[in-house]
Amino acid sequence: MMEDKIYSKTLETSNGTAYFHIEAKTNETFLRISWDGFINEERAKAGLLEQVEALSETKRLKLLVDNRQQTGPFPKGIEEWIALELMPKINRLGQVKAAHILSDNVFTEYSAKKLEESSFNDKQNANLENFASEDEAIQWLIG
């Protein structure tokens, strides 16, 4: 049922397994993002660039990022790439607010906490927080 979505995109591995999905629903003010499986550097960059595309196209600057289905850590060194390559693109769009729903996977959770502590998370241009539940994350995003 496409009519309740104004934006929807899925990225897949070479064997057709979805690892990233992003959508904007008409009745929500934020973008929903989900990461699935193991995310290598190539997949991370492709998904993050797709986020910028969706932010630009929908003009929605709030992100609900669901990491619950992700396995393993974010790629090593991705924070630097985000700071140097991604944040300048995002900053041109405005102030972004991102709520991450943490994975039970200890490595994914550790990576998410490292991202939250990164220098680009300045609470001005980018405001990133981690949450244990979807409800908490949404309340913070729309609050």
Image (cartoon, rainbow, N blue to C red):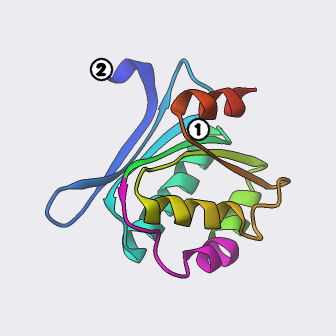
Q: Would residue 17 be found to the left or right of residue 6 on screen?
A: left
Q: Nearer the viewer, residue 23 or 103?
A: 103
| Residue 114 versus residue 12 in the image, above or below | below
Q: Is 83 included in the stretch rendered in magenta?
A: yes
Residue position marked by numbered label 1 in the rendering: 58
Q: Which one is earlier in the sequence, the residue at label 1 or at label 2?
A: 2
Q: How many marks?
A: 2
Query: Could you say where residue 42 lies in the image, as x and y percent from the top left?
Result: 39, 74
Q: Residue at x 52, y 21 (%)?
A: 26
Mark 1 neighbour density, 10 Å: few (under 14) some (14–19) many (20 or more): some
Residue 14 occupies quadrant: bottom left
Residue position marked by numbered label 2 in the rendering: 1
Query: Could you say where residue 62 lies in the image, as x and y percent from the top left?
Result: 66, 40
Query: Could you say where residue 69 lies in the image, as x and y percent from the top left?
Result: 35, 49
Q: CA distance from mark 1 to mark 2?
A: 19 Å
Q: Secondary structure at mark 2?
A: loop
Magenta region: 70-85
| Residue 88 versus residue 95 in the image, above or below | below
| Residue 105 versus residue 129 in the image, above or below | below
Name the residue type under label 2. Met
Q: Nearer the viewer, residue 127 or 31?
A: 127
Mark 2 neighbour density, 10 Å: few (under 14) some (14–19) many (20 or more): few
| Residue 31 versus residue 70 in the image, above or below | above
Point out the image quarter for the N terminus.
top left
